[in-house]
Image (spheres, coloured by chain):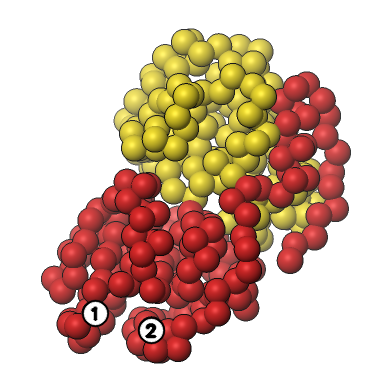
Amino acid sequence: MIFASVGSMLPFDRFVRGVDEWARDNPEKDVFIQIGGGDYEPRHAPFARMVTLADYRAKLNACDLFVAHVGMGSILQALEARKQMLLLPRDLALGEHTTDHQMHTAERFRGRQGMEIVTTIDELKAGITRLLCNPLSAGGEFSAKASPQLTAAVALFLSGGTPQNSEVRYA
Amino acid sequence: MASGGGHWIQLLRLRDAFSEFETSYVSMFENYADEVHGCRFYTIPDASRFDKFSFVKVWIKAVIIMTKERPHAVLTTGSAPMLSFIILGRLTGARTLWIDSVANAERMSSSGRIARKLAHRTVSQWPEVAAREGVQCWGSIL
């Protein structure tokens, strides 16, 4: 099963239409799309505006490929579920978000194991077909918790202390 | 408190930091209550920065929640509507903390920049961004 999601808030019709067209061209494959606030409603795949978080996790765990926008909720949950993911960032110039931060997030995550980031709908469609045949190897164990440094600093702040700047480097 | 989607997931990843405290949660979708069993959970309406009326609705709900809870500390991972809790927290003597989303990898969010002037502490999750914006970095939810 392919689980596709554009998050819960803003429309991302370009993405939804692309995945729907892929579903039309590949009728033998199961596709489910969470479409958020978009105007375009899929005609070739079941969809929901937003599923509950529990249902979202169930669909994520059941899928062979997760296709999504470059939202942190999508990325974090797919990393936690250790699913291969194919991502398309929202484009500020096309009015798909209020800032261009998805492009920046994409740059930070590009090259990470188990994840492929594309920039066009044609690449997205080709990517779905390719990753179903040749799955990416999923990344290693990914904790469902924040870094110990951040957790400790926040706990210290909450109990009245004054955490110091940490020189954290990221993998 | 955290808005829906990634903001909420980031907050959940920080849970160990407040496990020792009596905690109540605020977000935007009722079904999130299932994630925080045993804690009080409230929702506020979804509000975009461009819709003045929905912002009023957020403020009314925020005042009700803060009056009822009287928290010692307010912690949020964003987004903009949660600034209301930072302001109300300041007015009621709570310690206030804004953790800018890890999605803001090049510059702080516009809400984060407002929070920088209002909250006791505002932190970025990226050291370079923190240095550029004149805030601290304590680490990341990754």
Question: What's the colour of chain B in the image?
Answer: yellow
Q: Which residue is mark 1?
A: A29
- Residue in the foreground of this view, choosing between A90 and A80: A80
Q: In which quadrant of the rendered view does residue A5 lie? A: bottom left
Residue B68 at what x, y percent from top left? 47, 10
Q: Residues within 10 Å of mark 1 (few under 14, many from 20)?
A: few
Q: Can residue B116 be seen from the camera position used here? A: no
Kindly indicate whether the residue at mark 1 contacts the one at mark 2 (C-beta within 8 angstroms).
Answer: yes
User: Does residue A76 appear left or right of residue B62 in this picture?
Assistant: right
Q: Name the residue located 77 percent from the left edge and 37 percent from the top edge.
A: A153
In the image, residue B44 sits, relative to residue A13, either above or below, namely: above
What subunit carries mark 2?
Answer: A
User: Does residue B66 appear left or right of residue A110 in this picture?
Assistant: left
Q: In which quadrant of the rendered view does residue B65 lie? A: top left
In the image, residue B6 sits, relative to residue A108, either above or below, namely: above
- The secondary structure type at the circle numbered 2 is helix
In the image, residue A10 sits, relative to residue A100, either above or below, namely: above
Q: Can residue B66 be seen from the camera position used here? A: yes
Q: How far is disc 2 from disc 1 in space, using C-alphas?
A: 10 Å
| Chain in red on the image | A
Q: Name the residue located 45 percent from the left edge and 29 percent from the top edge.
A: B37
In the image, residue A35 sits, relative to residue B97, either above or below, namely: below
Q: First in sequence: mark 2 or mark 1? A: 1
Residue A13 at what x, y percent from top left? 28, 67
Label placed on residue B52: none
- The secondary structure type at the circle numbered 1 is loop
Q: Which residue is mark 2?
A: A132
Instruction: Please state which amino acid type lies under the numbered disc 1.
Output: Lys
Residue A73 at what x, y percent from top left? 48, 54
User: Does residue A20 appear left or right of residue B140 in this picture?
Assistant: left
Q: Name the residue located 66 percent from the left edge and 60 percent from the top edge.
A: B106
